[in-house]
Amino acid sequence: QVQLVESGGGLVQPGGSLRLSCAVSGSAFVANVMGWYRQAPGKERDLVATITHSGTTKYADSVKDRFTISRGNAKNTVSLQMNSLKAEDTAVYYCNALFGPPGRAPFDSWGQGTQVTVSS
């Protein structure tokens, strides 16, 4: 069974930095795309950033030039470096991995979420 485990959330002051990490276990396949999404209270879950297995990245406009997504050397790991954090970045951050194994239907998996709170 595929599982995603996130780490690195917490409380930080405005202007500060945090680094989120996510590792996938239980999959023999390399994820085609890994990404981070976030959900603030009372709002929908939105895309923050994604990265393909070849390194192509995509960012939400609200985080461009502040956040950087990267894949680790270990298979199916991804990190999100968040700089210049703002109060509006406060949310639960979820890791996502999209798999497209040969001969099988694509599927994705989600982590349990990690809280990021930006407050003075």
Image: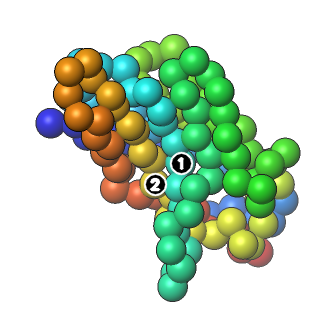
Q: Earlier in the sequence, mark 1 or mark 2?
A: 1
Rendered view: 100 above or below 120? above
Locate residue 51, reporting x and y percent.
58, 33
Locate residue 54, reporting x and y percent.
57, 18
Q: Return the residue nearer the eye: 41 or 14.
A: 41
Report the residue at 45% width, 47% height from top. 95
Q: Return the residue nearer the eye: 92 or 98.
A: 98
Q: Quadrant of residue 56?
A: top right
The residue at which mark 1 appears reads as 36
The circle on residue 94 is: 2
Report the residue at 46% width, 54% height from top. 94
The three-letter code of the residue at mark 2 reads Tyr
- Helix, strand or loop status at disc 1: strand
The circle on residue 7 is: none
- Helix, strand or loop status at disc 2: strand
Report the residue at 53% width, 79% height from top. 43
Q: Residues within 10 Å of mark 1 (few under 14, many from 20)?
A: many
The three-letter code of the residue at mark 1 reads Trp
Q: Is residue 81 left or right of residue 35?
A: right
- The image shows a total of numbered marks equal to 2
Q: Is residue 28 left or right of residue 35?
A: left
Tell me whether circle 1 and circle 2 mark residues in contact (CB < 8 Å). Answer: yes
Color style of the picture: rainbow
Q: Return the residue nearer the eye: 51 or 114.
A: 51
